Image: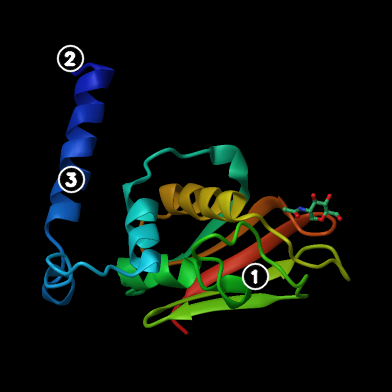
Amino acid sequence: MLSTTLVLQLLLAISGVTLAAPKPAEYHMFPRVMVRPAHLEVLKIRASTAVNPAAVTETTCLDSFKKIVFHDENVAELSICGGIAGSITKCGGAPASTTGTSGSAQFVLNPVDTGATINISKGRWEQCVRAARAVCPTGSIKATCAGGASTGDVTFTLDNP
Ligand SMILES: *[C@@H]1O[C@H](CO)[C@@H](O)[C@H](O)[C@H]1NC(C)=O
């Protein structure tokens, strides 16, 4: 019987292998002194394994065969609300809706309540996407984040642009 610790070690080992095998274009970045902060933040998103299922109230797997490149997804995730990378801790500007796009990935966010505006915190947003991805590991998604607006919840879709 596998112990929980062993399973965790295996999962960490698998994610370690993934991180240690970057795409050729990224590989050449590591010997350089300058690494873009947004790139480090993308790696942080990927390395995080904690899933809070309560962060998402409803998740629908739309098309599990849609090709959404993981790196694009991570960059698009930080591109909502005009960009929430670096020291930015929440969606600013109280938009009525917002998108985050990079390559093969596009997030579209809308408040559930009519007239509400989006002010989701970065932590809440990352938890919501992670929880939705735990339900639908591949392809396009429609899900509802708990909270994240001036009133009520925020729905999002992740699909090709
Ligand atoms: C979003 O707005 C609501 C209502 O004004 C407020 O209670 C909540 O703290 C805000 N959230 C963030 C992350 O600023």
Is residue 64 visible from the viewing direction of this image?
no
Q: Mark 1 sits on what residue?
A: 109
Describe the element under mark 2 as helix, strand or loop.
Answer: loop
Describe the element under mark 1 as helix, strand or loop.
Answer: strand
Percent coordinates x, y for residue 24 in the rendering: 11, 74
Q: What residue type is labelled 2?
A: Met
Q: Nearer the viewer, residue 127 or 38?
A: 38
Dot 2 beta carbon under 8 Å from ligand 1: no
Percent coordinates x, y for residue 154 in the rendering: 70, 60
Compared with 72, 14 (above or below) is above
Percent coordinates x, y for residue 54 in the rendering: 61, 39
Number of the front mark, 3 or 1: 3
- Whole-number angstrom distance, CA of label 3 to CA of label 2: 24 Å
Q: Mark 2 sits on what residue?
A: 1
Question: Residue at the location (54% across, 58% down)?
Answer: 60
Q: Which amino acid does label 3 sit on?
A: Gly
